[in-house]
Amino acid sequence: MNGFERIKSALEGRQPDRTPIMLHNFMMAAKEAGYTMEEFREDPKKIADSFIKSIEKYDYDGIMVDVDTVTLAGSVGVPIDFPVNEPARSHLGCLSSLDNIDNLPPVKVENYKYVQIWLEAVRLLKEYFNNEIFIRGNCDQAPFSIASMMRTPQEWYIDLIGDEKNAHKLLTYCTDVTSQFIDLMAETGSDMLSNGDSPAGTDLISPEMYTKFAMPYEKIIVDRAHENGLPYALHICGNTDSILEQMLDTGADALELDYKTNAQKARDVLGGEITFIGNVDPSDILARGTLKDVRDKTIKIINIFADTPRFILNAGCAIPSTTPSENIQEMIKVARER
C-alpha cells in the first residue's frame, strides 16, 4: 500500500498493511523548509514545498494542510495579527453586540486572499502527489469557533447564557461561512475535509452547552462535506471524554482528539464506527520528550487501537516548530514496526 491507500483504508474500516500516519505539522514543516510563518502563509507554493520536503524527509502517509486558525475569521472582518514567525491570530472581535447580527453583510469567503492561498496550496499538493499521499484539506474553523472570534471568547460565552436566540442566529451565519470553505476545498481535489472547533470543548463549556450550541452546527458541516462526496474529520482540543458520544453523533468519519482525551475511553466509545486520529502529546512528548518518551507513548497508543483498523497515528494537536526531528523520526519508526 502507498500512503493514500493506507489512510483511505483506515477511514473505511479496512485493515491497512501497517499503521497509517498523518501529521499536524505545518509549523514544523515551514521551519524545516526554511520559511518564516509570514512567508508560508503568503505563498501557496511555499506551503506546498514545505509539505513536500516534510514527506521526503519523514516518509509519512497523509498531509493535513493547515495554515492558522483565523482565516475564516479574517474573511468576516475580525482584525487579524500577522506575526512573522508565528501563525496568524486574533485578539479583537468584529461584532460589538448580538443586537447587530441582522446588520452583518453577506460574505463570500472566496474573496479573501488567504482563503485562496490555502486552496491553491491544496491544489498544488494534490497535483504533485496524485494518489500516492493522502491530502486532507483542513477548512479552518467550525461555526462555534468563528462566532467566538467575532464576539471575542469572553463575550461569546456570556452570549450563550444571556441571548440564546441571537447566539443561534450568529451560529447560522457562521455555518454559511464554514460551508463556503468546505465547498471550495472540495473543488481542489482534496481527499478529505476537516475543521477545528476547540472553543467548543469541555475545557471551556459544559457538555450540555456543547450539545446545544456547537454539535448541531458541526453536524451541518459534516453533512455538507458528505454532500461533496468526501470524508470529514472533526478536531477539538482539550479533554473531550464527556462529549465523545455527541461528537460521534455529528456523523464525522474521524475524530482528531487531543492528548488530554483518554484514548482507551475513546476506543471504547467510538468502537468500530469511526476512525480515531491522534493523540500523542505534541508538546511534552514530541517537542520536549526523550526518544524513550516518544517510543513508549507511541507504542501505548498503537496498542490501544491494535484490534481495529480505524486508527491513524498523529499528534493530539499542532506539532510545535521547535520539535526535534529525531522525535518525529522515532514516532514514525515505531509505527512502521507495527
Image (tube, rainbow, N blue to C red):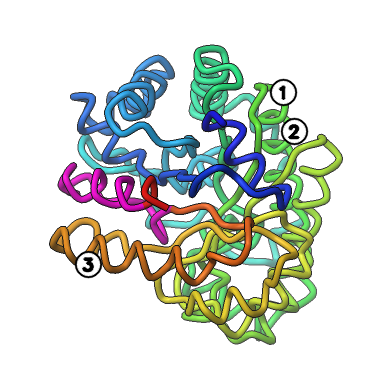
Q: Is residue 135 above or below residue 146?
A: above
Q: Amino acid at mark 2?
A: Asp
Q: Are marks 1 and 2 in contact (CB under 8 Å)?
A: yes
- Which of the two discs, 3 and 1, labels the residue nearer the N terminus? 1
86 in relation to 91, above or below: above
Q: CA distance from mark 3 to mark 1?
A: 37 Å
- Local SS, label 1: loop
Label 2 packing within 10 angstroms: few (<14), some (14-19), many (20+)? some
> Marks 1 and 2, how far apart in space?
7 Å
Residue nearer the viewer, 168 or 318 = 318
| Tag 2 residue | 183
* Mark toward the start of the polypeptide (2 vs 3): 2
Q: Given the image, on which type of amino acid does mark 3 rest?
A: Asp
Choose between 221 and 285: the one closer to the eye. 285
Amino acid type, callout 1: Glu
Q: Residue at point 47% right, 36% down? A: 61
Res. 193 image quadrant:
top right
Q: Position of residue 199 (x, y in %)?
A: 52, 68
Tell me the crowding category of disc 1: few under 14, some 14 to 19, or many 20 or more residues within 10 angstroms, Cα based. Answer: few
Magenta highlight on residue 299: no
Q: Is residue 325 magenta?
A: yes
Which residue occupies 72% across, 41% down? 105
Categorize mark 3 by other alpha carbons within 10 Å: few (<14), some (14-19), many (20+). Answer: few
What label sits on residue 187 in the rendered view? 1
Q: Nearer the viewer, residue 263 or 239?
A: 263
Q: Which residue is mark 3?
A: 284
Residue 151, percent from left and from top: 54, 63
> Which region of the structure is painted magenta?
314-334
Q: Is residue 312 left or right of residue 308?
A: left
In percent of the image, x 69 and y 72: which residue is there?
Answer: 271
